[in-house]
Image: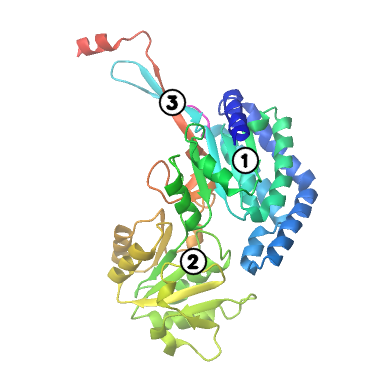
């Protein structure tokens, strides 16, 4: 641990300020090194996938481990978009003139040393080595033991990119030691680590929140809901529900449970089954027992139990439950939701406004897919995670959220005492 933190401290002192051209060079080098070293990364990743399969991980979790050409393409695209965004994000503000005639402006500064703890998504390793560093931070990255071999290969790639850009070697440190005592020790070092970003299950995030005094940018679990009002277009609601889940079933911004007004719940159940009938991959509709009469024989359904409230279905499954109306839906979301992403489908503007007033989440989606809760899709630029906390940042953690600011007062010789005497 001392070696990790000493390296991070040295790197922090040696790093250039945000906006320096070396960060753009680092991004360019990272894309080049990823592309040229991708075969080695894939070979290491095959080891992790094989180990995960032998360990009995489910197919969805194994899929989260696995890398392919599409992941490389997505990462290279992320790097390109980061390079485009950097000049604007890191530019000093123009400032304003204070009442005493001094000019006040803001100068971007990095958060400092950022510790990211995440689970079995190797693409997060690259994201963590890219986005915080591009705006001047030091990154300590500790992924799940399931991707240890992949992370070792990625650490080599990142190290080469840092060298190419002439940035300190300690700027990014990928921790592959599986000993959890190391993680526990790092979480106690608020004197050396300025920010903690956990990405993963609710249990991981809760552990970080309760085990550390380091400020946390928390991306909570995605127990997300879609309220379908009796005024809704049900065919549209069905398409929205399936798009909100089946594109990436384990993502944090996907749908778990449809809360349907009881006047339309049975017809919506039938609409969901119709909408999903032609899908190439199998999926499952978990149906509240009160809606059993709406299910035709042989439909891909299972019973939705009371224990499913507040649960993430880490599979291609969506639940549907009838509610008496908006008030019950809001009460359910307040009790079981994770304040991540919540949606409403309604043609009645009053129902939409009542939903927006009653539900509190990082993003509220009206008549659209919950998966629209995404930094690039929302026009906010590249994102590191989605935060559900209430301070500093909420929603997409974009490049600007990985910066803080110093106020600069260009006083021009003005004194506070003279100012007070004049007033």
Residue at the image point whose x is 47% and y is 62% from the top: 370
Q: Which label belongs to residue 312?
A: 2
Is residue 324 in view from this perspective?
yes
Residue 25: image location, x then y, percent:
68, 32
Residue 230: image location, x then y, percent:
34, 75
Work out which residue is located at the far bottom of the displayed protein and give it: 297
Which residue is under mark 3? 406
Residue 326: image location, x then y, percent:
30, 69
Asked whether disc 3 touches disc 2, contact meaning CB atoms under 8 Å apart, the reply is no
Circle 3 residues within 10 Å: few <14, some 14–19, many ≥20? few
Asked whether disc 3 touches disc 1, contact meaning CB atoms under 8 Å apart, the reply is no
Q: Which label belongs to residue 130?
A: 1
Q: Nearer the viewer, mark 1 or mark 2?
A: 2
| Residue situated in front as seen by the camera: 421 or 131 | 131
- Quadrant of the rendered structure where residue 277 is? bottom right
| Residue situated in front as seen by the camera: 148 or 357 | 148
Please give the range of residues in magenta.
89-94
């Amino acid at each position: 641990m001392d070696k990790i933190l000493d390296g991070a401290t040295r790197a922090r002192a040696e790093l250039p300020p945000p906006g320096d051209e070396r960060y753009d060079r680092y991004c360019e080098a990272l894309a080049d090194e990823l592309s040229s070293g991708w075969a080695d990364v894939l070979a290491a990743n095959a080891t992790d996938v094989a180990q995960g399969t032998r360990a009995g991980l489910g197919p969805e979790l194994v899929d989260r481990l696995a890398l392919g050409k599409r992941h490389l393409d997505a990462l290279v695209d992320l790097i390109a978009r980061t390079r485009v965004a950097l000049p604007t994000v890191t530019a000093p503000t123009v400032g304003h003139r204070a009442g005493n005639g001094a000019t006040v402006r803001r100068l971007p500064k990095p958060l400092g040393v950022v510790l990211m703890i995440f689970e079995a998504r190797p693409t997060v390793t690259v994201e963590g080595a890219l986005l915080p560093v591009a705006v001047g931070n030091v990154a300590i990255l500790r992924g799940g033991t399931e991707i240890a071999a992949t992370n070792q290969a990625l650490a080599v790639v990142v190290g080469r990119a840092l060298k190419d850009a002439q940035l300190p070697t300690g700027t990014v440190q990928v921790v592959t030691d599986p000993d959890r005592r190391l993680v526990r020790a790092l979480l106690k070092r608020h004197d050396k680590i300025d920010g903690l970003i956990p990405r993963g299950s609710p249990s991981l995030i809760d552990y970080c929140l309760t085990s550390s005094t380091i400020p946390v940018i928390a991306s909570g679990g995605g127990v997300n809901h879609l309220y379908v009002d009796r005024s809704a277009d049900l065919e549209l609601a069905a398409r929205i529900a399936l798009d909100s889940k089946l594109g990436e079933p384990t993502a944090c911004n996907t749908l778990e449970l449809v809360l349907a007004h009881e006047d339309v719940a049975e017809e919506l159940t039938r609409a969901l089954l119709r909408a999903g009938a032609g899908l190439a991959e199998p999926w499952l509709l978990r149906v509240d027992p009160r809606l059993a009469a709406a299910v035709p024989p042989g439909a891909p359904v299972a019973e939705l139990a009371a224990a499913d409230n507040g649960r993430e279905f880490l599979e291609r499954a969506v639940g549907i439950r009838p509610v008496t109306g908006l008030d019950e839906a809001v009460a359910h979301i307040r009790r079981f939701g994770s304040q991540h992403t919540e949606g409403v489908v309604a043609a009645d503007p009053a129902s939409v406004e009542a939903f927006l007033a009653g539900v509190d989440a990082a993003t509220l989606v009206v008549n659209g897919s919950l998966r629209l809760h995404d930094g690039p899709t929302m026009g906010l630029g590249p994102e590191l995670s989605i935060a559900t906390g209430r301070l500093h940042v909420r929603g997409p953690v974009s490049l600007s959220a990985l910066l803080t600011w110093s106020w600069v007062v260009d006083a021009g010789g003005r004194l506070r005492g003279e100012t007070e005497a004049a007033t």
